[in-house]
């Protein structure tokens, strides 16, 4: 972890480059990384800081780096328009205005987002604020406060990471059967002192939804993407889409050991072997050592959050996510630069087009965005904001998804979010909305909007 708080005036150098990494299979995989052979740093900064980044591209392909979750102007958002050519440096000043939250950054190079992110162009950006730093919560980094990047991988017979696309992979998104935690084959083990332990979780899979549980007891959720929940939510299972973040507490006072488990939905070959259902994998085993850690109690109140008020909305926009949109659209999608293996995906009948703005939003106005699909479950993401979910798949979202979010699940019926944007995104630097199954995004299930 790189703690930014002391170096207020120093520029922060992030170098994207090819690397070689052993995930624990005994073989070296060809990977990508940011200041590292695989993945990037966990950066921690404080609300009110402006982060002066120098993002160097030492790859042999063009890339971009998007700050997922940040409320920042379109010009520094790192979307597909802010291309960094090989050998070039992009130097955005990124202001942190929002409250404590877990954010991340990843490649957003249109057509290459899935491959570059899967191979390792992703990192974590934690924002703290006065309230989070003084909150009665464990916060000693890598003692009782851990960040976990969860990913699924395919390893070939030689133990090397394999990534490839086909028509079927575009359809389902790329999924692996092997769980990797912070770049290491699961399960990983960690000794912790007696007390509460905080886990900050990112689902950085390209396409896989994860069903999280604890070996003993429920999961205690304290925060979602955009910040703390009003109070602790206990749940048997936590269902996380690609791109989602949640923070949880594990009580290591009464238990000598407990394990965070990740359920993978059985698909394809595994479904024929084991039937549909979940294969549960151990992700992280915590074992208590003789140390004394954070000795506070499970918190009751975490943040002040009013119920979202849909009557504040001045308009409603509809978004229909579409797959298999036919041969004519496939030709058009290809001509517009989408990478899709011969098919097409779209939103409201339009595959992504870099020089077409799909929506123009007025800054500071509250809106309802209604998203629907005609097939499978898709995770929908909006840049430049945190929103509140009014309904998910036609019903109320689970309690842990009722706080600040930038991801919503869309499957049956409508999912509706209440959203407002506080920064400008001009035509040359628009924000994106898209499915966060990264192969769907590259394939054209993405649109662009301005804010002004
Ligand atoms: Cu995490 Cu537009 O992406
Ligand atoms: Cu984003
Ligand atoms: Cu999708």
Image: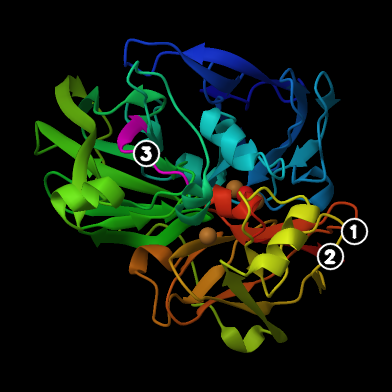
Residue 427's disc is 1
Most distant residue in the bottom direction:
311
Q: Which residue is mark 2?
A: 357
Residue 138 picture location, percent across and down: 35, 37
Disc 3 residue crowd, few under 14, some 14–19, many 20+, Cα 10 Å: some
Quote the CA–CA distance across marks 1 and 2: 7 Å
Q: Quadrant of residue 343?
A: bottom right
Quote the CA–CA distance across marks 1 and 3: 37 Å
Callout 2 secondary element? loop
Q: Quadrant of residue 88?
A: top right
Reading the chain from its start, which is encountered first: label 1 or label 3? 3
Disc 1 residue crowd, few under 14, some 14–19, many 20+, Cα 10 Å: some
Residue 92 picture location, percent across and down: 81, 35
Q: Which residue is mark 3?
A: 176
- Image marks 3 and 2: residues in contact by CB distance under 8 Å: no
Q: Identify the residue shown where x is 56% and y is 83%.
A: 309
Quote the CA–CA distance across marks 3 and 2: 34 Å
Residue 254 lies in the magenta-colored region: no
Callout 1 secondary element? loop
Residue 16 picture location, percent across and down: 67, 22
Between label 1 and label 2, give the one nearer the viewer.
Answer: 2
From which residue to which does the magenta span run? 174-180
Q: Identify the residue shown where x is 69% and y is 44%.
A: 111
- Image marks 1 and 2: residues in contact by CB distance under 8 Å: yes
Between label 3 and label 2, give the one nearer the viewer.
Answer: 3
User: Can residue 242 be seen in this snapshot?
Assistant: yes
Reading the chain from its start, which is encountered first: label 1 or label 2? 2
Residue 203 picture location, percent across and down: 43, 44
Q: How was the colour assigned to the protein in this rendering?
A: rainbow
Q: Identify the residue shown where x is 36% and y is 63%.
A: 400
């Amino acid at each position: 972890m790189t703690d930014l708080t002391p170096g207020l005036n120093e520029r922060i150098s992030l170098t994207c480059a090819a690397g070689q990494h052993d995930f624990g299979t005994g073989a070296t995989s060809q990977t990508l990384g940011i200041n590292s052979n695989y993945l990037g740093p966990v950066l921690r900064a404080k609300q009110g800081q402006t982060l002066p980044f120098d993002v160097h591209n030492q790859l042999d392909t063009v890339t971009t780096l998007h700050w997922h979750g940040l409320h920042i102007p379109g010009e520094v958002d790192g979307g597909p328009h802010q291309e960094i050519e090989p050998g070039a440096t992009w130097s955005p000043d990124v202001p942190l205005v929002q409250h404590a939250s877990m954010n991340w950054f990843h490649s957003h190079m249109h057509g290459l987002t899935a491959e570059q992110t899967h191979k390792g162009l992703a990192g974590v950006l934690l924002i703290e604020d006065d309230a989070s730093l003084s909150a009665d919560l464990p916060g000693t980094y890598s003692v009782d406060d851990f960040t976990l990047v969860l990913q699924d991988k395919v390893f070939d017979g030689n133990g090397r990471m394999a990534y490839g696309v086909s028509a079927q992979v575009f359809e389902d998104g790329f999924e692996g059967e092997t769980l990797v935690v912070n770049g290491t084959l699961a399960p990983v083990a960690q000794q912790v002192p007696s007390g509460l332990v905080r886990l900050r979780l990112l689902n950085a899979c390209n396409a896989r939804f994860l069903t999280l549980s604890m070996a003993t007891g429920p999961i205690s959720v304290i925060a979602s993407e955009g910040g703390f929940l009003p109070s602790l939510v206990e749940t048997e299972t936590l269902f996380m889409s690609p791109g989602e973040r949640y923070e949880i507490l594990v009580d290591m006072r009464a238990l000598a050991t407990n394990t965070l488990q990740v359920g993978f939905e059985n698909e394809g070959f595994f479904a024929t072997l084991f039937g549909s259902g979940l294969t549960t994998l151990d992700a992280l085993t915590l074992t208590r050592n003789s140390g004394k850690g954070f000795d506070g109690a499970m918190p009751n109140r975490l943040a002040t959050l009013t119920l979202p008020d849909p009557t504040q909305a001045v308009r409603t926009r509809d978004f229909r996510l579409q797959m298999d949109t036919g041969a004519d659209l496939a030709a058009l999608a290809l001509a517009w630069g989408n990478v899709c293996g011969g098919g097409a995906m779209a939103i409201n009948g339009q595959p992504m087009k870099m020089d077409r703005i799909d929506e123009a939003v007025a800054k500071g106005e509250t809106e309802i965005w209604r998203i629907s699909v005609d097939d499978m479950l898709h995770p929908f993401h909006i840049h430049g904001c945190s929103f509140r979910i009014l309904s998910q798949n036609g019903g109320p979202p689970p309690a842990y998804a009722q706080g600040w979010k930038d991801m919503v699940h869309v499957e049956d019926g409508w999912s509706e979010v209440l959203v407002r944007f506080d920064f400008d995104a001009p035509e040359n630097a628009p924000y994106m909305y898209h499915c966060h199954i990264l192969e769907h995004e590259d394939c054209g299930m993405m649109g662009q909007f301005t804010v002004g």
